[in-house]
Amino acid sequence: MRRHVMTRLLALLVATATPVFADGGTILLHQETRPFVITVFASPTPPRVGAMDMSVLVQSSETLDPVLDAGVRIALTTGDSHLEVPATHNQAQNKLLYAVSVPLNAPGQWHYSLSITRAGESTPITASGDITVASEQPKLLSYWTWLTLPFLSLMVLSLHQWLRFGRRASPAAKPRPGD
């Protein structure tokens, strides 16, 4: 019985777990533009107003080895807003990626373009795409997993106490002599 309850509890925890993304996030673009294969990632998923992390993986199109000596610039535009920032290895957790955190100030359709220049070359390679940015998530909704943690802990403690002490039935009434 106890194993069955623990299996159900484990299944519940796995089912309610928040998905964990790799260092880059959601893939926005994967394109071969000789001499590179370019992959662009964005996090959070879906992209929202506020800070958005953009990561770029630049690979050699011949060997698919990461290119670590390139200069990467990302430009984002929507309506009257224009933002251009360099992406570097320093801002990335995974040092194979070029990354930058960009502040998006409006929801809607944004256009991004990349300019990649390899060390020693003057002609940049470009790639571009569009991204839909959702409105800012309400603060309470963004912390719902942390707010439910105390209640989940109390449920686990209650289940433990019920399994440990609740199943102990009071000793059956012994028949009295003469009954």
Image (cartoon, rainbow, N blue to C red):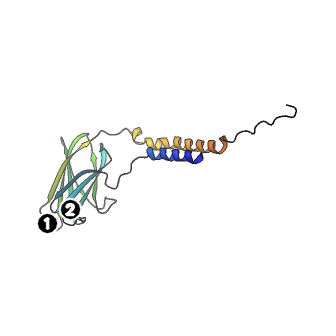
Element under disc 2? strand
Quadrant including the N terminus? top right
Cα distance between the residues tagged 2 and 1? 10 Å
Point out which mark residue 20 bears.
none
Q: Amino acid at mark 1?
A: Glu
Q: Residue furthest front?
A: 179
Q: Which residue is mark 2?
A: 71
Q: Within 10 Å of the Cα at label 1, are there few (<14), some (14-19), or many (20+) other Cα atoms? A: few
Of residues 53 and 24, the one nearer the viewer is 24
Element under disc 1? loop
Q: Residue furthest left?
A: 123
Q: Residue at x 18, y 66 (%)?
A: 62
Q: Residue at x 15, y 61 (%)?
A: 34
Q: Residue at x 30, y 61 (%)?
A: 90
Q: Amino acid at mark 2?
A: Gly
- Asked whether the viewer can see residue 51, the reply is yes
Q: Residue furthest right?
A: 178
Q: Position of residue 87 (x, y in %)?
A: 25, 57
Of residues 133 and 62, the one nearer the viewer is 62
Q: Position of residue 98 (x, y in %)?
A: 27, 59
Number of numbered markers: 2
5 versus 86 height, above or below:
above
Q: Which residue is mark 1?
A: 121
Quadrant including the C terminus? top right
Residue 24 appears left or right of 166: left
Q: Residue furthest bottom?
A: 120
- Answer with mark 2 or mark 1, whichever residue precedes in sequence: 2
